[in-house]
Image (spheres, helix red, strand yellow):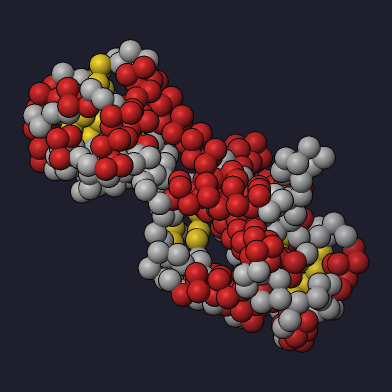
Amino acid sequence: MNISIFGLGYVGAVTAGCLAKRGHSIVGVDVHPQKVEAFDAGVATIVEPCVPGLLLAASNNRLLRGTVDCRDAVISTDVSLVCVGTPSNIAGALDLTFVRQVCRDIGCALRAKQRRHTLVLRSTMLPGSTRRIVEESLAPPLLSGALEVFYYPEFLREGTAVMDYEQPSLNVLGTSDGSPPPASFMRAFFAEEATVVDWETAEMVKYACNAFHATKTVFANEIGRVGKQIGVDALAVMQLLCRDTRLNVSPQYLRPGNPFGGSCLPKDVRALTQQARVEGLNLPLLEALLPSNERHLQQLLTLIESAGQREVVLLGLSFKAGTDDVRESAMVDVAQALLGRGYQLRIYDPALNPGALIGANKRVIETKMPHLASLLTTDLAGAIGSCGVIVAAQKCASIDELQRYATSAHHVIDVNGWPELRELPSRYEGFCW
């Protein structure tokens, strides 16, 4: 396949070398003549293991050519990859100037081309960027069927970029609507199967990954500062933490939905940050956990209020399904807030029996919701029939039961990702999706 790569920096050079290794013919395009000349000679302009050898081998096999001429590159290739930079502007926002300019140039070049072309955007861009750029610069050839556009995020680490390209930890390809591209395209670019999603999801996952990596680094460093201050080996602590692949290094807790609560997490975050303050340490990430959790709760209340109905039923009050533990449960706070704002509220939670509560659970209810018994109901039909909004916080009723009682007049708010709720005749709305 003949492929043009726009931007011969880090991502462009690595991508060029790896694709040439597979036998593809590469035309490298850049606005800097020095980069183009070096690329044309098979000389790497970045320092990265294996890349110099890949580019030199490709040049020796006459699989590399450099140019500053966009029109020439587009006309002489079947696929164009955009790998130009997306730096921050002075205010910290993403600067798409280079991507927009390249796409405008490609759009102009396509007018002189008499056959179909494929454009693959690799530059890191915020969700919605690909769609806007297509509308601004590429809509005519796209709508005429002369162009296909994909978004292909890169997950290359400096120092191991070639390995990451050839053995990716994550392979994602974005199409306009999430429909899979032709099998021949997939075979040309991916040694392993790629997950196909829409443009916006592919753009977002790159940011989610990088934010997660940054969060893990800051978290480890903050635990390190606490450990150092109180004489604990934080390296040993983090090694132990990583041994737990069921809860810690796992998909657990990485699911948007309910704010965290219960008897452990809020209490222990509070204790750790308080200890840090006593030791004179500033831990911005850990100290932000509880305020962020509270902001998430307020967002849920805003979503409920936006439904525009004053009668609400909560499915689930405890902090975790199948338990009667209401200690620092987000749904207790939701119930309390709704009642304080004059809502008519019913609660359906078969696991919860006010008369059987003891100890801390009993104190929570006596303090926050002494009238809980009057709000709880075991009659799901009656609870749903008399309300306009169903807040599904837990799976404490079956879909079959909900199918019997929910109607088109109901607004269902899914707090924790229960996809079967979409099957109900009601209006469905996810909390974070």
Instruction: Give whichever of 332, 298 is nearer the camera.
Output: 332
Residue 173 image point, x, y percent = 50, 58
Residue at point 62%, 49% (across, down): 285
Q: Is residue 7 above or below residue 316?
A: below
Q: Nearer the viewer, residue 157 or 334?
A: 334
In the rendered view, does 2 fall on the left or right side of 72?
left
Give above or below for 163 relative to 96: below
Q: Position of residue 119 (x, y in %)?
A: 60, 55
Instruction: Specify the quadrant that holds the N terminus.
Output: bottom right
Q: Quadrant of the C terminus?
A: top left
Pinpoint residue 81: horizontal percent, then vertical percent. 65, 60
Residue 71 or residue 158, whichever sits in front: 158
Residue at 71% in and 43% down: 94
Label tally: 0
Residue 38 image-quadrant placement: bottom right
Is residue 416 or residue 409 the one in the foreground? 416
Viewer can see residue 407: no
Q: Is residue 87 left or right of residue 21?
A: right
Does residue 188 lie above or below 374 as drawn?
A: below
Q: Residue furthest top?
A: 342
Q: Which residue lies most toward the right here?
A: 34
Asked whether the viewer can see residue 129, the reply is yes
Residue at 38% x, 23% y is 337
Q: Quarter of the image holding residue 54?
A: bottom right
Q: Residue at x 60, y 38 (%)?
A: 132
x and y, in percent, of residue 248 in the image: 45, 64
Side of 12 relative to 306 (left or right): right
